[in-house]
Amino acid sequence: MTSAQEEGTYSSDAKMKAVGLNAWYGKKQALYDVSLPFPENHVTAIIGPSGCGKSTLIRCLNRMHELVPEAKVQGKVMLDGTDIYSSALDPADIRARVGMVFQKPNPFPNKSIRDNVVAGLRYAGIRDGRKLDEAAERSLRQVHLWEEVKEDLKRSGAGLSGGQQQRLCIARALAVEPEVILMDEPCSALDPTATAKIEQLVIDLKKDYTVIIVTHNLQQAARVSDRTAFMYLGKLIELGKTTDIFEHPREGLTERYITGKFG
């Protein structure tokens, strides 16, 4: 199968895809005509040097980019065949279907572990205590945090270690039962032990979710992802199977980046 045929196959099976995506911050353009499929139950890593548009891209994938003053988006982001930028869709509903985990753990400091996890469900109007308790346990088990905190769910989420806080934030994203999970450098503030737990979690999550991870750590991209996209100066330079990108890149610019000649 040729590279073009392979990309077409993944595009047709994609849970989500960007189509001709352009983005601006005021007059400064950050993305240029990015088209990129994200296959269901795969981990797609987005790599590239600082300022290349990685974080802008994933913020466009759940309509968070438009929350920035004077930000603008053109193009389409398709989720199950529907453009998420359609005026008929509520951005809040999109953000529930496409969850986001940020670079720095951000648990709500005045909420307990349990209330951190179910915050999104409460926002959606769910008040049934039993349902909230079940969702909290389910989500904490998914991120392998339940056994560590089950005896102390009333403790402040901010009192956990950095790695535990990040897993708590992932549990919070999972509690609303999203379909896609976006992760923006989720390990950059963590130590190696906590990073290893998050990486294993990323691999586990793809069984049930479509995962898109931005990372500056090339070794991490190689360890956790099925597909890798390399971006440079707001443009998609190359996309392929992770092993191909790292072992047999087609583009000279990609090869220079992954071999450390710039970045």
Image (cartoon, grey):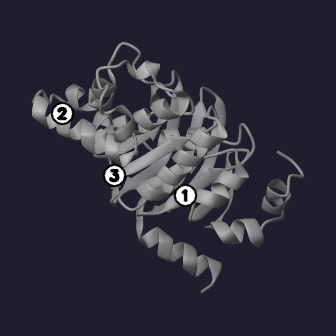
Q: Circle 3 is placed at which residue position? A: 179
Q: x, y percentage for residue 241?
A: 62, 69
| Residue type at tag 3 | Glu
Q: Circle 1 is placed at which residue position? A: 44
Q: x, y percentage for residue 3?
A: 63, 78
Q: Nearer the viewer, residue 163 or 176?
A: 163
**Residue 157, picture quadrant:** top left
Q: Nearer the viewer, residue 40 or 168?
A: 168
Q: Is residue 192 left or right of residue 256?
A: left
- Helix, strand or loop at label 3? It is loop
CA separation, marks 3 and 1?
14 Å
Q: Is residue 215 left or right of residue 92?
A: right
- Is disc 3 in contact with disc 2, using a CB cutoff of under 8 Å? no
Q: Which mark is first along the chain, 2 or 3?
A: 2
Q: Quadrant of the N terminus?
A: bottom right
CA separation, marks 3 and 2?
19 Å
- Helix, strand or loop at label 1? It is strand
